[in-house]
Amino acid sequence: MTPRPHHPRHSVPLLHALTFIVALCSFAYELVFAELYTVVFGGSVTQYGLTIGLFFSSLGLGSFLSGRLETDPESNFFRVETYLAVVAPLGFLLVILLGTLRYPAAYAPLVGAIARLPIVTIGFLSGFELPLLTTLSESVRDTARPPSSIARGVRRLTSHLNRAFGVVLGAAFSIKRREGKPSDPADETSAYAAVLGFDYLGGLVGSLVYVFFLYPAVGLIPSVFVLAFLNGVAALIFASTTANTHRPTLRSRLPQPVGSTGKALFAVCLLVTASTGAAAVNAGPVGEDVSEYYFEREFELEYAPGAMDVAVTDTRTTRYQRVTEYNRTWTGSGDNPYFGATTEHCLRLDSAVQLCESWADSYHQGLVDVPLSMFENSTDTKVLLIGGGDWAAMDRLQRHGVSVDHVDIDGEFMQRAKTDPFLAQYHDGAYRYENKSTRVQDAFQYLEQSEQRYDVILLDIPGATDDDQLPLYSVEFYSQLRQHLTADGVIATWTYSRYSYAQHRTAYYNTVHKAGLTSAAPYFAWEDIDADGETERVERFTLLAPAPRDSLSPHNGTAYMNRYQHRYQAVEWVDTPRYAGVRPNSVFHPNYDILIK
């Protein structure tokens, strides 16, 4: 006589709950790794597209091969959740490590391929989950065991929801209708359909939890440990419900998946769950330690080997950007060509350098003092400052006594900058300037709603280092800026070197020319930043306008302009360069060559 297969003591609601949890984790992993790849390799559209594609193709492959695991679904489901709890955090740390390595450019494709192995593995393992849970759910339904009162309540609720949706679906589709009252509400929904429904629901909740809670409140790095902890908990809960209590020996009372999988894997599951749980509880210190290690190594890669030592002093993430403060110390041989002191403090927004002590003053003097020398220092001069959330540009503007409309999207960073010790020395409380109006708003939205025209528009915005900045370097954006200029108005912006970033330069100038800004006046900020007694060109800026404007008037400017007036007297208006065969960057047709790579 063929022995009847053992049916573990699962309930349908429990399996549905596990389906919900593991789906939440899998879909959240997808977002975690997409954001991680964006941080390490840049280009959010590219990284999210690749990650989603690789995840779902791997998910499909795992589902396709899952039939080989259904002979022992209990053991294999336990294995899958344990493996995910191990692979996800280790894979995350692997990508972090790859981002800190120095390697020849020819090896970049290989490094990129290796970095994608974690999300491929996670997708592949996640592909096993739904088929295994469906098999387990079907085996439970086939078992003649009276459901508990809680299970009956859940199944009644499921039945009512099923009927309610049936009414809606019946209006648009030909559906199967049942006559009379079914003997079991669960009969109205197949095991596969029910598990699939909870899988999709878990995916939705996982996305929402990551976007609105984990990423902003916990951070990217701790998020992966929280999700791995949930995988481990799911495995342990599942194992605890399959305990065999029909035999009196202690060994036989181990959870059934452990009996066929091995006590070693069960111990691994316990260890990983405890470790990831501890990391999740200590999210702050863990996130800070890992992020500091990564950013310190990443920033050091920008210099020759052994030339610079970087120590992160503070890192935080707002809704719109990552803010990192750090000290850089010259450790190379010979004189320091970057700054006069041995060590200086800097600030970055995402991957772009925003301020360093050696050139913070000269940067803002170049951005503000140079274009303002063309206009009267009074409230009759209207200035629009876009960006500048560190308030340093506002400090220069208040010295000119002009009227300022200030627009920045990151209110959290602006509020923090008011009391930040490093930034406070450059803004001198300029957020209290009485002749300014500050709006926490998207610049595009402000320009569309406002009819105000300005003598000077200052762009103190992050560099074009990521897809998120593409709209701020588009034809549409610069067209809006042009429409808000007075008859003699100018736009002032920091620009990249044509020698280091030729591809960006050609796309950028074709973009602004397409926007109707056909005249440009390039110039530099000047300072002795390395204290060698010689004045160097520090930052490159460009004035843009629909037509040539008056020459600069350095003798009417600040002490900075008077000191370097012989340099600014030579600044001339020229036709905005145009380059054949280069497409402008548009919001709906982006040219990724405009990004700094």
Image: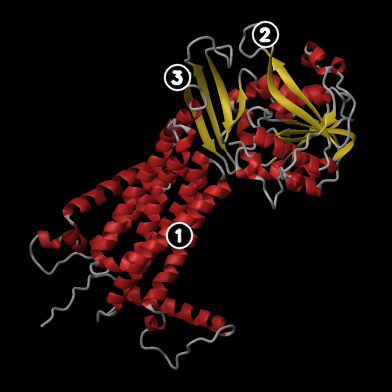
Q: How dense is the environment of label 1, judged by Cα within 10 Å: few (below 14), some, or many (20 and up)?
A: some
* Residue with the mark numbered 2: 534
Check the picture and name the quadrant holding the N terminus.
Answer: bottom left
Sequence order check: which comes first, mark 1 or mark 2? Answer: 1
Residue 58 sits in quarter: bottom left
Q: Nearer the viewer, residue 400 or 464?
A: 464
Would you say 331 lies left or right of 242 here? right
**Residue 148 in the image, given as x and y percentages of width and height:** 30, 75
Q: Secondary structure at mark 3?
A: loop
Can you say whether 537 is above or below 579 in the image?
Answer: above
Can you say whether 241 is above or below 92 in the image?
Answer: below
Q: Amino acid at mark 1?
A: Phe
Q: Secondary structure at mark 1?
A: helix
Residue at the spot 64% in from the left edge and 37% down from the top edge: 464
Sequence order check: which comes first, mark 3 or mark 1? Answer: 1
Instruction: Evaluate whether residue 18 shows in this view.
Output: no
Q: Report, in whole angstroms, how far the alpha carbon at label 1 lies from the one at label 2.
A: 58 Å
* Residue with the mark numbered 3: 306
Q: In this figure, which colouring scheme has been used for the structure?
A: secondary structure
Q: Are marks 3 and 1 in contact (CB under 8 Å)?
A: no
Q: Report, in whole angstroms, how far the alpha carbon at label 3 lies from the one at label 2.
A: 26 Å
**Marker disc for residue 56:** 1
Q: Nearer the viewer, residue 143 or 309?
A: 309
